[in-house]
Image (cartoon, rainbow, N blue to C red):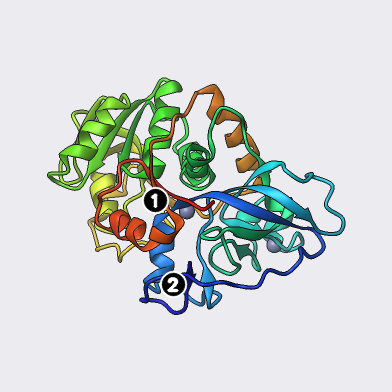
Amino acid sequence: MVLDAPGRPLAARTIELRDPGPGEVLLRVAACGVCRTDLHVIDGDLKQPKLPLVLGHEVVGRVVALGRGVERFREHDRVGVPWLGATCGHCLHCLADRENLCDTPQFNGYTRDGGYAQHMLADAAHTFPLPDGYDDAHAAPLLCAGLIGFRALRFAGEARTLGIYGFGAAAHVIAQLAIQEGRQVFAFTRAGDADSQSFARQLGCVWAGATTELPPEPLDAAVLFAPVGGLVPAALRATRKAGTVVCGGIHMSDIPSFPYELLWGERVLRSVANLTRVDAEEFLALAPKVPVRTHVQCYPLAQANTALADLRGGRVQGAAVLMCE
Ligand SMILES: [Zn+2]
Ligand SMILES: [Zn+2]
């Protein structure tokens, strides 16, 4: 399913496959998660995508061919491919264990073709074995919603009371992780979104309400997954002194000005960008131990545009996943 230009629907097309280059693996794709970032690419919020482009960065597939020098995998291995597609290995950030901030990174489904397809070429060093206990569809959301959510949750530190703004795919994964760690989770959704609020309560959140409400007690930390800048002052207002507000999305509408008083008291406001391979290894080992159970809404690959429209319209509970075989 190919994006020819921002703003256009994806088109089904046959693309000639090339053999995997050095360090690459060729995958037969089984399932690919649909992420809000894909909407940001389609909408042109993320600049200069590869065009035409195959979206998709929560890819579950099986290795069908190995490029020269790949020793990490064998044919038929089931693997996962996340957002981080390749890193340079020698810039300031790569050398400081922050490869998520690499100066010349590649991203799957953005600067290289991703997994809205039957086959995909991936950099083997940025491809991961997947835990057993998840079928292909349920494993897919672990690869972005899970991974980025995990990184965002780590930045919430020791928070006992945790607010999550925007209760979509990432939120439903990290709520489970946070609850298992003994935290109290407060879920914030669009006003009137009773389905998402009851979904949050079913997962064990102690409170669910609208983003316009204040929680019944102050938050030690908040994580924002909704790409709405106006939620930043709202989350700061709900967070106690020395608390942290983490922005987990790759794009957000402008943040309105707000009184300094909301940040005063040593509150910390920060973003989370991408993931490192260490995040992937740690989270994929942790998820089955929690255990994180993903909730998926599956669509055939050919219905990618419907899945994207449902995500945009708030009609997905948990994660949308394309079945690509
Ligand atoms: Zn780098
Ligand atoms: Zn994503």
Residue at image point 15% right, 41% down: 213
Q: Residues within 10 Å of mark 2 (few under 14, many from 20)?
A: some
Residue in front for this viewpoint, 96 or 147: 147
Residue at image point 61% right, 42% down: 280
In the rendering, at what x and y percent does residue 303 appear? 38, 59
Residue lying at the far right of the rendered structure: 69
Q: Report helix, strand or loop for mark 2.
A: loop
Q: Can residue 251 be seen in this view?
A: no
Q: Is residue 267 above or below residue 8?
A: above
Based on the displayed image, in which of its 4 quarters is residue 69 positioned? bottom right
Q: Is residue 248 left or right of residue 81?
A: left
Is the CB–ligand 2 distance for label 2 below 8 Å?
no
Q: Name the residue under label 2.
A: 11
Q: What residue type is labelled 2?
A: Ala
Q: Mark 1 points at which residue?
A: 299
Is the CB–ligand 2 distance for label 1 below 8 Å?
no
Q: Is residue 323 above or below residue 15?
A: above
First of labels 1, 2 by sequence position: 2
Q: Can residue 231 be seen in this view?
A: yes
Circles 1 and 2, Cβ within 8 Å, touching? The answer is: no
Q: Is residue 117 left or right of residue 224?
A: right
Residue in front for this viewpoint, 316 or 262: 316
In three-dimensional space, the C-alpha distance between marks 1 and 2, rounded to whole angstroms, equals: 16 Å
In the rendering, at what x and y percent does residue 6 appear? 41, 77
Residue at image point 57% right, 29% down: 286
- Total label count? 2
Q: Residues within 10 Å of mark 1 (few under 14, many from 20)?
A: many
Q: Is residue 294 left or right of residue 75?
A: left
Q: Report helix, strand or loop for mark 1.
A: strand
